[in-house]
Image: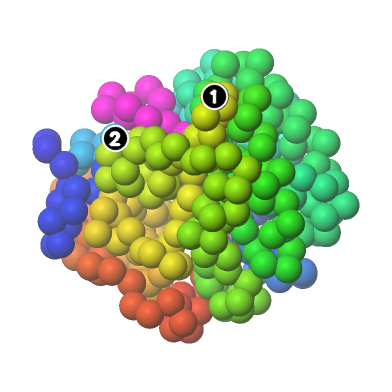
């Protein structure tokens, strides 16, 4: 089959699967202090159910899968899921987004199970600020996780930094300098207004263009690719001359990339979300649990695709439209 094409003629080949809404951190911008009300165990898709949806999606043209959460490494037996997903014929790219706190423990097994690359979320290089934004996280563990991933041959390692004015804007240059000697791809992501509980204010979002200007003061930024060639996904990629690593700028707020959006998201409780900024969800669980056949499930997938908007509306209305917090979507 030659791919899932949506009603706006975009080829949808990327499925992001949230496997849990549990997280071992409480990042201030991602969830409220007291956490969020969690899905019950019976509400979360089993690995068999996730694999069934993934296999069907792959048959229909998905060839890129990301495992996310919550924190994916807190779900029991995550390595076995990775092994099975990487074994699906047709999956050419399997990755994971993680806070890396448990990566030291899991990196080698994940690599053996077929995980080739990883994105690590890290919003500060200062242990005390990291502890504050994550409400208790230990930055040392994150670095141990990254080191373990490198030793296990997981590559590239991308470091995701949500750039938040008044919090980590003083660290942008230091994050970028990490790429001078290490082969990381450091990606600056604009802070997005997601979920009812988000405390997003427009002035907290640092536009990618101003990050670029600041980085150009360190050294010229050599452009590596355009956003449509697929290598960096929505990131515009750059490199300092002679640097070991790369820098990515991701601008969902100041300059959306809806025209080339190739994504579908599956929440941990089995709902398909076709646009990060839309409230529209298509629930697959009733079908999965009522003995529906693959044809019926595939028809539901097509139905979900119909709801993928050409682009999201004005960013200001997003918080009202999209009530799921990011921890329940997966980023
Ligand atoms: N626990 C994993 C982790 O920390 O990477 C995966 C889930 S987390 C929800 C996925 C990503 O979403 C993280 O990189 C996080 O920084 C990002 N994120 C959460 N809320 C965001 C927001 N409002 N704007 C931009 N990125 C956000």
The picture places residue 250, in percent across and down from the top left corner, at 46, 53
Over which residues does the magenta segment extend? 86-99
Task: Classify mark 2: residues with Cα within 10 Å, few (<14), some (14-19) or many (20+).
Answer: many
Q: Is residue 164 left or right of residue 47?
A: right
The picture places residue 188, in percent across and down from the top left corner, at 56, 51
Quarter occupied by residue 285: bottom left
On whether residue 98 falls in the magenta region, the answer is yes
On whether residue 263 falls in the magenta region, the answer is no
Q: Is residue 114 left or right of residue 134?
A: left
Q: Which residue is mark 2?
A: 63
Mark 2 lies on a secondary structure that is loop
Q: Is residue 113 left or right of residue 77?
A: left
- In this view, 77 is above or below 321: above
- In this view, 67 is above or below 145: below
Q: Which residue is mark 1?
A: 242
Q: Quadrant of the N terminus?
A: top left
Q: Is residue 138 left or right of residue 176?
A: right
Quarter occupied by residue 210: bottom right
Query: How far apart are labels 2 and 1 at the CA level?
Result: 33 Å
In contact (CB < 8 Å): disc 2 and disc 1: no
Mark 1 lies on a secondary structure that is loop
């Amino acid at each position: 089959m030659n791919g899932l094409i949506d009603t706006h003629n975009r080829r949808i080949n990327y499925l992001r699967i949230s496997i849990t809404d549990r997280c071992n951190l409480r990042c201030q911008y991602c969830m409220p202090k007291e956490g969020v009300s969690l899905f019950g165990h019976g509400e979360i898709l089993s690995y068999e159910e996730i694999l069934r949806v993934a296999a069907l999606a792959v048959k229909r043209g998905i060839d890129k899968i990301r495992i996310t959460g919550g924190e994916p490494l807190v779900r029991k037996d995550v390595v076995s899921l990775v092994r099975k997903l990487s074994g699906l014929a047709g999956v050419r790219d399997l990755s994971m987004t993680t806070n890396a706190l448990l990566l030291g423990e899991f990196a080698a097994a994940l690599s053996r199970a077929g995980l080739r690359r990883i994105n690590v979320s890290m919003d500060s290089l200062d242990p005390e600020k990291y502890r504050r934004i994550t409400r208790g996280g230990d930055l040392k563990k994150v670095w141990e996780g990254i080191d373990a991933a490198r030793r296990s041959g997981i590559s590239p390692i991308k470091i995701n930094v949500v750039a938040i004015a008044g919090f980590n804007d003083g660290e942008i240059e230091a994050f970028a300098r990490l790429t001078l000697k290490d082969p990381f791809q450091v990606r600056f992501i604009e802070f997005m207004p997601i979920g009812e509980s988000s405390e997003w204010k427009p002035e907290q979002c640092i536009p990618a263009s101003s990050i670029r200007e600041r980085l150009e003061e360190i050294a010229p930024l050599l452009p590596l690719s355009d956003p449509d060639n697929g290598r960096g996904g929505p990131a515009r990629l750059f490199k300092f001359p002679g640097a070991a690593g790369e820098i990515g700028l991701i601008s969902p707020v100041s300059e959306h990339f809806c025209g080339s959006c190739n994504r579908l998201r599956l929440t941990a409780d089995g709902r398909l979300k076709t646009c990060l900024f839309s409230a529209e969800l298509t629930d697959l669980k009733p079908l999965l649990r009522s003995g529906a056949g693959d044809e019926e499930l595939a028809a539901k997938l097509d139905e979900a695709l119909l709801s993928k908007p050409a682009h999201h509306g004005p960013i200001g209305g997003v918080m009202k439209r999209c009530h799921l917090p990011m921890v329940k979507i997966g980023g």
